[in-house]
Amino acid sequence: MLLAQLFSFSAIVRANENVQSPVVNGYEVTFRYVGTGEEQSVLLVGSFNGWQTSGDKKIELTKESDRIWSVTKTLPDGKHMYKFVVDGNWKPDPLNNNQVDDGYGGKIASLLSVNLFNNNASSRSLGTYKMS
């Protein structure tokens, strides 16, 4: 009984977490995707890996919980466009409101900046999702 209550409490705590993406800390960037729980794979593609979904430049997110996937990458200084590939479907980051034309037929890509002059600044996030 107590064990069931602990699991239930843990689920409630996780349900009220704020999920942020991307979180930039110097050159380290953590990307998170909040899904439905039905996803089989989530990839990160962007200008930093040549938009590759296979080969040695492929970037796979790891499932953190039922609905949250994440990966942390070191990115060079500059502006970077990116998307998630969720079970083969390309999607902009729904947590990042900073989006631009990706240059391929008007599809939207998410944008982030990694700034040399901000390297010593504390972490910052471009978007937050309140888990419900």
Image: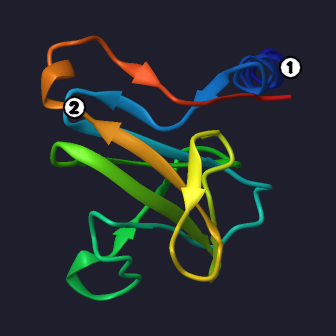
Could you tell me residue 79's position as x and y percent?
31, 47
In the image, 1 versus 125, the foreground residue is 125
Could you tell me residue 74's position as x and y percent?
20, 46
Reading the image, the residue beneath label 2 is: 115
As drawn, 34 above or below 61: above
Could you tell me residue 70's position as x and y percent?
47, 48
Identify the residue shown where x is 42% and y is 58%: 81
Identify the residue shown where x is 78% and y is 16%: 9
In the image, 15 versus 118, the foreground residue is 118
Reading the image, the residue beneath label 1 is: 1
Identify the residue shown where x is 81% and y is 20%: 12
Identify the residue shown where x is 48% and y is 25%: 125
Q: Secondary structure at mark 2?
A: loop
Answer few, some or many: residues within 10 Å of disc 2's Cα (few below 14, many 20 plus, some between 14 and 19): some
Residue 97 horizontal side relative to residue 114, left or right: right
**Sequence-earlier tag: 2 or 1:** 1
As drawn, 89 above or below 34: below
Please state which amino acid type lies under the numbered disc 1. Answer: Met
Please state which amino acid type lies under the numbered disc 2. Answer: Asn
Residue 91 horizontal side relative to residue 27, left or right: right
Quarter location, residue 18: top right
Answer few, some or many: residues within 10 Å of disc 1's Cα (few below 14, many 20 plus, some between 14 and 19): few
As drawn, 70 above or below 48: above
Q: Secondary structure at mark 1?
A: loop
